[in-house]
Structures are given as structure tokens and as C-alpha cells.
Image (tube, grey):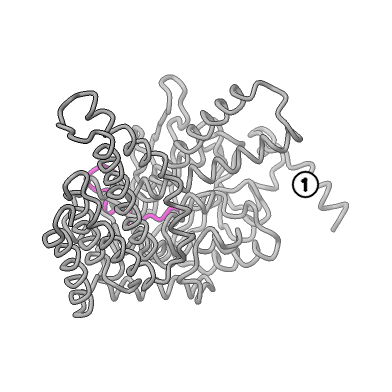
Amino acid sequence: MHKLDPRVKLIMVFLGIVAMVSETPGNIYPFVFYGAVILTLILLSRIPPGFVLKRLFFVSPFIIMAALFYPASLMLAGEYKFVNPQAEAINIGLSIFLKAGMSIILLIWLISTEKFHALLHGLRKLRMPRLIGIISALMYRYVFILADESLKTTRARDSRSPGKLKMNRIKVYSNQMAMIFLRSWERSKTIYDSMLSRGFTGDFKDMKELELKRNDILISVLIVLVFLSIRVFIEPGA
Amino acid sequence: MPEAIQIKNLSFSYTPGKPVLNNLNLEVKPGEKLGLIGPMGTGKSTLLLHLNGILAGSGMVKIGDTLVENRSLADIRRKVGLVFQNPDDQLFSPTVEDDVAFGPLNFGYSREEVAKRVRNALEAMSLTGFEKSVSHHLSMGERKRVALATVIATNPEVIAFDEPFSSLDPSMMAQLLKLINGLQATLVIVSQLFLPLLSCCDRVAILNKGSIMAVGPAKDIIRDDELMRSNGMDLGFYKKACRAFF
């Protein structure tokens, strides 16, 4: 799975997410099958489940919020005719939770089996708008600068504040944050200068050309067909 | 044969009314190794950025017979390589190989040619085997060599170094000096460390208050106590220490 062409993975994940999010609200049954497919992908890729769960944990508050508030908002707005409000609201909330949760697990599978720059290369080959490609690539590079500057300023702070901070914490942290952004901005300017000095004109070029193999096509077609079959043939409430 | 670098009446300021470079004139011959010294904040790094067209002040900067201007930038960046002071500012790709290939790929070389240039540049910097390494896992000396490899891979006519000898231990400095002395390109080296400059530069120029105050043979300039002191570089401490310890 790790060796699949990034373009193929991107298409698989995109179609998988489209199949899942287009399920009728409140329809939970197909997610048993989607879950089985995604679990198979994770196991075949030998990604430790703990690794996936840890990442899912960080985004879970947002998913839970959406799952709780969306049914409540439907009930309050009166746009949706509930026959059995309590059970239907739980079903809709649960289906939102499953749609979002499984889409994110699929994305975690994608980023765990492919390097970010290879995904960007794949996206460029799939004719992603040039500007979005450049912005994504630069953002990815600058995330590390932010992390680096954050580490340096934290060390500087800790070296002069043994134990608990005695000063106004909010003031110290906000000053540190402002400093991190200023320093990152300065450094990103220098990095951009160094890119310009080596002929960068806005296009990231790749050393290796992507090659689509027969196996890539076979595996991706199979997985996409499974996703689409679940979407088409598993009836709501079956 | 034209000068490798020709600068005439170059002025530049980051904020209006505070010129960093002030009517600066300088000429460097092809193949020459020129050291650029001066107190902190006198515009040495700013001058290097003008050689590559990253900054554009008023006046004239010529590399060989090409004028540095907007329409010649592609050509100029092929001709002039910049080695930044902090290698982390120069190494931003996932692997060493990707970083070294960045320049040649942007200059439009074929993939075979890029692979060859990457191989040769890494070999010249004694970095064969580091292709798949992640840059920020390397030591400072290795990162400095990778930064130099990223420039050498584009085979520029002029290489401008910004403080190449800072943060290096003596053996790494000796290694870098050997590499620099083996380069065929015209070199401009900004450094606050005078001893390595003496061992690799033909001439030294003093930059102070945005202008070139003196240019001459490296030893003559650095030995001239009065000239050095009047330009904010008192070497008395170094001389005393050298006499006392060596």
C-alpha cells in the first residue's frame, strides 16, 4: 500500500470520502462496510491502530461538536420533519460522527502511507490549481520553521524561569507567541530569498517522474469499486 | 575579458533616509577570491543579496557582461550562487538530495543531468551516502557542506558566501577551507573571522558605513592596524592572544 502511486491514493481517498458523505443522513448501516474497508486498508498498510487513534483523538472534539449540534440545530430550525425526534436525532448525530470520523481515518491512512511532498507532486499531476500547490508546499515548509522558533523561544523562557512562572503567564505566553511569529516571518523571508537565489519561479519541480503501474490501477479500481458498491447497493436502513 | 563582478555607485536603503549601501564601487576579477570584512551592520550581507538580484538598489551591478536587472534575473541566478550564513535557511527540502537538486531542476536541466550534478556536488563535498538524509538531522559542519553543495550543483561563475566559517570547530573549518580553496569560481566571502580569510583570499575589501573603504592584498589590509582600527575593527586582542599562546 505504501508503494502505490500517490495519484491513485488521492483519487481513492477522494472517492471514498465522497461515497461516505453522500450517504443519507441518519443511515448508519453502510458504515459497517466502509469501516471494514478502511480497517482492511490500515491493516494491509501495517499502520499501528494506536497511531491512527492518537491522531483521531486530536480532531475528535470538532467531530463530536458537529455530531451534537447539527441535529439540535435541525430540531430548533424546524427544517427537518422528525417523527420520532429523539431516535432520529441520535441517528443523524451518529451518522455525522461516522462520516466525519471515517473520512478523517481515511485521510490519516493517506498521510501515513505517503510523504507530504509526494502527495503534493501527485496533486500537481492531477492538475490541482498552481497557486494552491505553491501555497500548500510553502505552508508545509513553514510549519517546521514555526515549530523550530517555538522550541527556541520556549528554551529561552524556561532557562530563565525555573519551575513555575511567577510573572503574569498570559502576558509571557502572548509575548512569546508574537515573537515566534515575528521570527518565523523573518526566517521565512530568508528562506524564500534562498529559494529565489536558486532559480525558484513559483513552480516546485520534482526529481523523479511518477510512474503509474498496472498494480496501482488494479488495486485502486478495486477499492473504488468497493466504496461505490457500498454506496449504491447497501440500502438505507437495510 | 570583463570583470567577474562590477559594481558602480550602488546605493540601497531598507528605510528611507538610512542608506545601508552608499555609492559603493567594487570590481572583482574572474577566478579571484575576495574577502569582505567590516563591522556588524555595515551592509555586507545586503551587498551579497544584490549580486544575485534578490535586492535591487540604485546604481549598476554587472556579473560578467550581464547587467543585474529584472529581465536578466534568470541568467543572473544561474551565474551567481549564494551560500547563506545559516544553513538552515538554505535547506528546506525533505532530503539532502532534494535540496541539492532544487537549483538544477529550477534551471531546467534534464532529470539525468540533475542526478549527475547532485552526485558530483555531494561527492565534491564528501557527502556521498547522505542523499536520503534529512538535513536538520545533520551536524552543523555537514549542513554547511550541504548548503555549499546546493550552490555548487548549479555550477555558478560567482559564489558569494555569508559567514561560512561561523559555528565551526577548527577541523571542520580546515575542511571547509580546503573545499573553498579548491573551487574554480570567483568567490566573495563575507567573514568576521580574519584568519580563515587570510588563508583563502587573494584580496580583502573593507566595507564600512555602506562604502568600500579599502581594497588590497589580504595580508596588507589586515596587518594595517591604523586602517583596521579606523574602520571599527581593532585586532589588538587577537594579536596579543596569538603572541601569548602560539
Say which of B56 and B130 sits in front.
Answer: B130
Say which of A84 and B98 sits in front.
Answer: A84
Q: Chain of mark 1?
A: B
Question: Does the image show residue B26?
Answer: no
| Residue B47 placement, left or right of A126 | right
| Residue at the extreme left of the image, as rendered | A232
Is label 1 in a helix, a strand or a loop?
A: helix
Question: Does the image show residue B61?
Answer: yes
Q: Which residue is mark 1?
A: B238
Residue B231 screen position, x and y as percent: 63, 34
| Residue B141 placement, left or right of A60 | right
Q: Is residue A39 above or below residue B71?
A: below
Residue A68 painted magenta: no
| Residue B227 placement, left or right of B46 | right
Amino acid identity at mark 1: Tyr
Residue B181 screen position, x and y as percent: 55, 66
| Residue at the extreme bottom of the image, as rendered | A214
Q: Which residues are magenta?
A: B67-82
Q: Residue at x 11, y 60 (%)?
A: A232
Q: Is residue B200 above or below residue B113?
A: above
Figure label count: 1
Q: Is residue B33 above or below residue A156?
A: below
| Residue B88 placement, left or right of B14 | right
| Residue at the extreme right of the image, as rendered | B244
Say which of A66 and B71 sits in front.
Answer: A66
Place residue B215 in its image quadrant.
top right
What predominant SS class does the magenta segment belong to? helix
